[in-house]
Amino acid sequence: MANDTIRFFGLGLGPGNPDYMTVRARKVLETADRLAHFCKRGRRGNGRTIADAIVGADPEREIALVYPVTTEIPADHPDYAAALNPFYEEAASRLLAEIEAGRTVAVLCEGDPFFYGSFMHLWWRLKDKVPTEVVPAVSGMSGAWTRAGAPITWGDDVLTVVPGTLPEMELTRQLSGTDAAVVMKLGRNLPKVRAALATAGLLERAIYVERATMAQEKIIPLHELPEVFDAPYFSLIIVPGQGRRV
């Protein structure tokens, strides 16, 4: 599919620092007719904030996709899907109308669009209806282990990526059987994740990383983190592997 036919973009903007944005992402960011971004009510989206260094506020270009819920309802609760499904349907219809009117639409995505991204819910609703391009990006976890100076895999190390939303027993099982790990989606799940890492014998190797590559970046060995700690959305835990070195 020729690039000039593309009307819908999933735009990966990287882990936070705009210096890590790809040339392709910057080009689309500067030229798209509409810039859509997910956000909480009354707040700018994380993806839109990353883009600030390249494109300033422009109400005529921006489409805010305001979540009806975020962390108020657990993701496995029936009310969560009941709220999010019509939201994504409406958002997809809204963007489709823009595209059918001849405009290009870029959905701004922190990290990589195909890695735990809300964009994917729009992508599978629209990918067969409009010409689409997903622009890959440096992921948040890559930014985290790089900024922490912690090579994540050596030799034949196996890397496991798990969401902190899993039950503690399942987290422990997954973490106990791997050489290296990344735990995403911390927030209120941090105490449970910490307990699972301790049970798996990985607590001393674990590193907490918050807002990797951003001005507010924090990198702290997990065992030094206070027991009561408010972990934001832009945080994760990495457990570097200890595999073969030559």
Image (cartoon, helix red, strand yellow):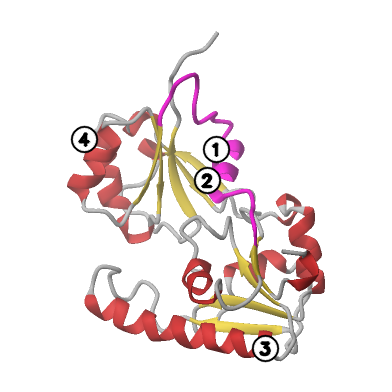
Amino acid at the residue labelled 1: Trp
Say above or below: 225 vs 134. above
**3 vs 4, front mark:** 3
Amino acid at the residue labelled 3: Glu
* Tally of marks: 4
Q: Residue at x 82, y 73 (%)?
A: 31
Main SS class of the magenta portion in the image: loop
Amino acid at the residue labelled 2: Met
- Quadrant in which the C terminus is drawn: top right
Question: Which numbered disc, 3 or 4, marks the residue that appears first in the sequence?
Answer: 3
Q: State the residue position of label 2.
A: 141
Q: Are marks 1 and 2 in contact (CB under 8 Å)?
A: yes
Q: Secondary structure at mark 3?
A: helix
Most extreme residue toward the front is 1
- Quadrant in which the N terminus is drawn: bottom right
Start-end of magenta stretch: 134-158
Q: Residues within 10 Å of mark 3 (few under 14, many from 20)?
A: few
**2 vs 3, front mark:** 3
Question: Which numbered disc, 1 or 4, marks the residue that appears first in the sequence?
Answer: 1
Q: State the residue position of label 3.
A: 100
Q: Secondary structure at mark 4?
A: helix
Question: Which numbered disc, 2 or 4, marks the residue that appears first in the sequence?
Answer: 2
Q: Residues within 10 Å of mark 4 (few under 14, many from 20)?
A: some
Task: In the rendered structure, find residue 199 and report the number of the disc placed on it.
Answer: 4
Q: Is residue 144 left or right of residue 195?
A: right
As for residue 143 lying within the magenta part, the answer is: yes
Question: Which numbered disc, 2 or 3, marks the residue that appears first in the sequence?
Answer: 3
As for residue 14 lying within the magenta part, the answer is: no
| Visible residue check, residue 133 | yes
Task: In the rendered structure, find residue 145 and report the number of the disc placed on it.
Answer: 1
